[in-house]
């Protein structure tokens, strides 16, 4: 079957041959003179005729070329559509965990476009999913040989090297990914894992902190950081034990660990052992006071806080605890002195304002009490207690409307607090 281009080419050859023969015959080499003269007069084309014929052939050629290009474009578009359809099919097969079928589909796509970078990358990721790390590395390197910054290729190459425990190559791949314009969002996280596995803990912590800079709620990064810090703590404890199992440092550290775990009797025991080793150590009396306070042993707590106050009379939290214990015992005048110091160090702490308000209310300084309870509400709008206390102050000030409004707020917030508490209770 002849194409339009073939037909145009034949037309051009025919015209050229005809023109050549006519020119040749006009010389009369093979015809009698009379016939030659008549023939040349009749057959010789004019310049205008030749011009029209050439234009016709040129138009034919142009049409043929355009048709050929159009056919090529249609074929290319069809191939691209087929490729896209295969990639969609492969992704669906991957999602259904039919990895063998997905691999076959990707290879069909590569038969259509052997150097399509996205297909090569996705097949490399699939091989990685199937733990075929060498095959994955080979495919991803093909991608990077063509485009060293192809999106995600260096990242997945690093993951495949990590799968092979080739930490040096893995680190190199993740670092190259991070130099690309839009690095994969998990690059810092996986680089942190590799550095951790390589024993480069400080660098690993730095990379994981980069994850938290990008997403403070990254639970995986937080878990790895906590695990590394925990392991470092355990390692430090073991080293301290090896140095001296009865050292001040070890007892103080164990006291903190027990307190964090809310094992307060054990914490007090360790803190007291630390004080026996170093009686002038600051901060230990305060820690003992907190442990006793948590156990509701207020006499022992107050005694320890007084010892801590002697070490540092301006410590805000020591004064807060002493003020709270005094207010609990209705010793409001004494509590006020401690709480005013606490307020200077912790001006935005709601509990400081609540306790100060109680002291002023007891002394009938109602405007000051109102101001403190309002400050407590500003500091913690979700707390119910300050609204109840403020309602009482308004009642004493004979402002019944304001008192009623605060009671409404108190009831609303109390209900919300109860609902949140019930949600935190274990369900049977």
Image (cartoon, grey):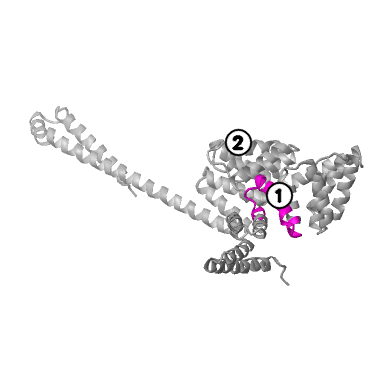
Quadrant location of the C terminus? bottom right
- Image coordinates of residue 193 in percent, x first then y, are 70, 43
Secondary structure character of the magenta stretch overall: helix
- Image coordinates of residue 196 in percent, x first then y, are 73, 41
Q: Secondary structure at mark 1?
A: helix
Residue 320's place in the image compared with 364, above or below, is: above
What range of the chain is rendered magenta? 326-353
Q: Would you say residue 166 is visible in this rendering? A: no
Residue at the disc numbered 2: 176
- Image coordinates of residue 398 in percent, x first then y, are 55, 67
Residue at the disc numbered 1: 337
Please report the residue visible at 25 percent of the width from the left and 38 percent of the height from the top: 12
Q: Nearer the viewer, residue 6 or 270?
A: 270
Left or right: 128 as drawn, with respect to 284 = left
Q: Residues within 10 Å of mark 2 (few under 14, many from 20)?
A: some
Please report the residue visible at 74 percent of the width from the left and 52 percent of the height from the top: 334
- Image coordinates of residue 384 in percent, x first then y, are 62, 63
């Amino acid at each position: 079957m002849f194409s339009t281009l073939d037909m145009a080419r034949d037309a051009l050859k025919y015209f050229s041959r005809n023109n050549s023969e006519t020119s040749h015959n006009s010389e009369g080499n093979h015809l009698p003179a009379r016939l030659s003269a008549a023939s040349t007069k009749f057959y010789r084309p004019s310049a205008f005729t030749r011009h029209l014929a050439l234009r016709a052939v040129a138009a034919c050629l142009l049409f043929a070329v355009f048709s050929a290009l159009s056919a090529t474009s249609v074929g290319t578009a069809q191939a691209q559509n087929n490729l896209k359809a295969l990639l969609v099919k492969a992704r669906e097969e991957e999602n259904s965990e039919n990895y063998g079928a997905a691999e076959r589909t990707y290879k069909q796509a590569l038969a259509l476009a052997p150097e399509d970078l996205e297909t090569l990358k996705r097949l490399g990721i699939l091989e990685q999913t199937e733990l075929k790390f060498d095959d994955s590395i080979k495919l991803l390197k093909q991608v990077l040989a063509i485009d060293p910054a192809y999106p995600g290729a260096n990242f997945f190459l690093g993951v495949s090297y990590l799968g092979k425990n080739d930490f040096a190559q893995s680190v190199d791949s993740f670092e190259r990914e991070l130099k690309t314009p839009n690095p994969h969002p998990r690059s810092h996280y996986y680089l942190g894992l590799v550095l951790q596995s390589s024993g480069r803990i400080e660098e690993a912590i730095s990379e994981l902190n980069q994850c938290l800079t990008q997403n403070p709620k990254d639970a995986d990064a937080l878990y790895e950081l906590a695990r590394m810090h925990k392991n470092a703590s355990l390692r430090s404890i073991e080293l301290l034990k090896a140095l001296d199992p009865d050292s001040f440092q070890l007892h103080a550290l164990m006291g903190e660990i027990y307190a964090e775990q809310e094992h307060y009797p054990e914490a007090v025991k360790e803190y007291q052992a630390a004080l026996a080793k170093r009686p002038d150590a600051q901060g230990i009396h305060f820690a003992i006071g907190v442990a006793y306070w948590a156990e509701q042993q207020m006499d022992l707590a107050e005694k320890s806080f007084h010892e801590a106050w002697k070490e540092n009379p301006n410590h805000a939290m020591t004064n807060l605890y002493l003020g709270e214990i005094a207010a609990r015992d209705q010793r409001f005048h004494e509590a006020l002195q401690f709480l005013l110091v606490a307020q200077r160090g912790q001006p935005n702490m709601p509990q400081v304002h609540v306790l100060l308000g109680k002291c002023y209310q007891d002394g009938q300084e109602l405007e000051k009490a109102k101001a403190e309870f309002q400050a407590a509400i500003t500091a913690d709008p979700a707390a119910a207690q300050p609204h109840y206390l403020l309602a009482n102050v308004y009642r004493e000030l004979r402002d019944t409307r304001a008192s009623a409004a605060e009671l409404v707020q108190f009831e609303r917030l109390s209900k919300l607090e109860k609902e949140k508490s019930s949600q935190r209770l274990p369900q049977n």
